[in-house]
Amino acid sequence: MEKYALLINGQQTGQDLDTIEVVNPATSEVIATVPNGSTKEAKKAVDAASEAFKSWSAHSAYERSELVRKWHDLIHENREDLARTMTLEQGKPLKEALGEIDYANGYISWFAEEGKRVYGEQIPATQRDKRMFVTKQPVGVVAVITPWNFPAAMITRKVAPALAAGCTVVIKPAELTPLTAFKLAHLAEEAGIPKGVINVVSGDSKTIGEAWTDDTRVRKLTFTGSTPVGKILMKNSADTMKKISLELGGHAPSIVTQDADLDKAVKGVVASKYRNAGQTCVCTNRIYVHESIVDQFTEKYVAEVKKLKVGNGLDEGIDIGPLIDDRAVDKVKKHIEDAADKGAKIETGGSVKEGLFFEPTVLTGVTDDMLCMSEETFGPLAPITTFKTEEEAVERANDSIYGLAAYVFTENISRGIAICEQLEYGIVGLNDGGPSAPQAPFGGFKQSGLGREGGHQGMDEYLEVKYISVGL
Ligand code: ADP
């Protein structure tokens, strides 16, 4: 069993601290331990990041880009090892883990280039003897707090733009999946990214979170996780007025209209529902199908779902791995029981196969009063309901505190665009069950968060704007 150390200022430390066990959700085996870092380690990490900021921010954008690019190349060389580590600690099938490593690395290559395009402006002055310039500067030390569902991508989406902009980072990975984060950070060191630019502290989330939100040297907090924790971090960041980016919960609707191509719709809604066993914030949580086609849609959908293979992610041909823990299993069970009590029909699945492995489940006859129609399930449960008019579908889709991702399936593209425009969501897939990409802005409306990751918008989150007025 491997014993990991903290990474602070280029040093592996914290071997003398208590440890947290990292468990393989497929087998319940302890696969490694990480140090249970606390306030002291959190502060030391900020000391290192503050010191490193002086020289890292003074590097040219091209120098930073070259080092970030080397990090990308090393991740690519080590993709098999990283993916295996991810499957072991998180459970997702190896092919999905490999996909995540490549996707995560896509953010690194995108931002390595985007860092070269942090342009300023010159504004025409009112007087002849003035010049007005606008420049952009790195915001400073960034605290990065990430969840367990994407152990690599949630880190690179934040760290790559931060580094490209000239910021330094302190990272607290999720307690459940810290190993991929440590491995990524070690590869960054190997790539020549200077010590102190990336620091990783595992440990109690509340203690480390508070040490960083209280610290005036931390100028920005970027978080992906649940909406309740996002609210705590936003409140805790208020006293020191940090810049914040929050990627929080979602409750994605999928709308399948009368004129949808059913095969395309089924493929898209299966992909968006069952990726990572349903444990992503952009997973479809509610399926609205026009009443005239619901029987055909359901038949095809259930047939596809029955083909999905559940098992240990390291085995060949697996589509769905274990859920992350007992709490996750209990939530899916609760949503199914509640829906069944209120009259829903279980078309397939419905229970635990063994351990944390949950059968992919489809429910029909679903009504809006069922828990699964308002709470994020975060599991392999697909509730199907019907609608009569598109106005009704849009209204019900928008009736949520969340506004992250939504999906629309129709062959009538003009109507499809009209629906996309009415949806109060930050990301909409039109005939596309997987819209996320490094070059596109990812983020939500309403209580799904603040700010965007990816795209040129993702760069601005790590930059301050400075206006320089020159009297000649
Ligand atoms: P999830 O439901 O995905 O686990 P959480 O919001 O609970 O979402 O966790 C996401 C990340 O936030 C994890 O790294 C977790 O350790 C961290 N976290 C949880 N509670 C707090 C807190 N009070 N302060 C700071 N970080 C926290």
Image (cartoon, grey):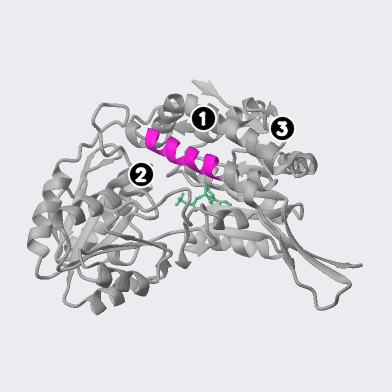
Mark in front: 3 vs 2 = 3
Whether residues under marks 3 and 2 lie with C-beta atoms below 8 angstroms apart, the answer is no
Q: Considering only order in the chain, which callout, 3 or 1, is on the residue closer to the N terminus?
A: 1
Q: Residues within 10 Å of mark 3 (few under 14, many from 20)?
A: some
Q: Residues within 10 Å of mark 2 (few under 14, many from 20)?
A: few
Q: Nearer the viewer, residue 372 or 118?
A: 118
Amino acid marked by disc 2 = Asp
Residue topped by disc 3 = 194
Is 102 included in the stretch rendered in magenta? Answer: yes
- Compute the Cα span from label 1 to label 3: 17 Å
Lateral position of residue 332 relative to residue 343, left or right: right
- Dot 1: element: helix
Residue topped by disc 1 = 75
The range drawn in magenta is 97-110
Q: Residue at x 25, y 53 (%)?
A: 268
Residue topped by disc 2 = 326
Dominant secondary structure (helix, strand or loop) of the stretch shown in magenta: helix
Q: Nearer the viewer, residue 387 or 1?
A: 387
The mark tally for this picture is 3
Lateral position of residue 94 relative to residue 413, left or right: right
- Compute the Cα span from label 3 to label 2: 40 Å
Whether residues under marks 1 and 3 lie with C-beta atoms below 8 angstroms apart, the answer is no
Lateral position of residue 270 relative to residue 217, left or right: left
Q: Where's residue 37, x and y in %? A: 64, 38
In this rendering, the answer to whether 108 lies above or below 183 is below
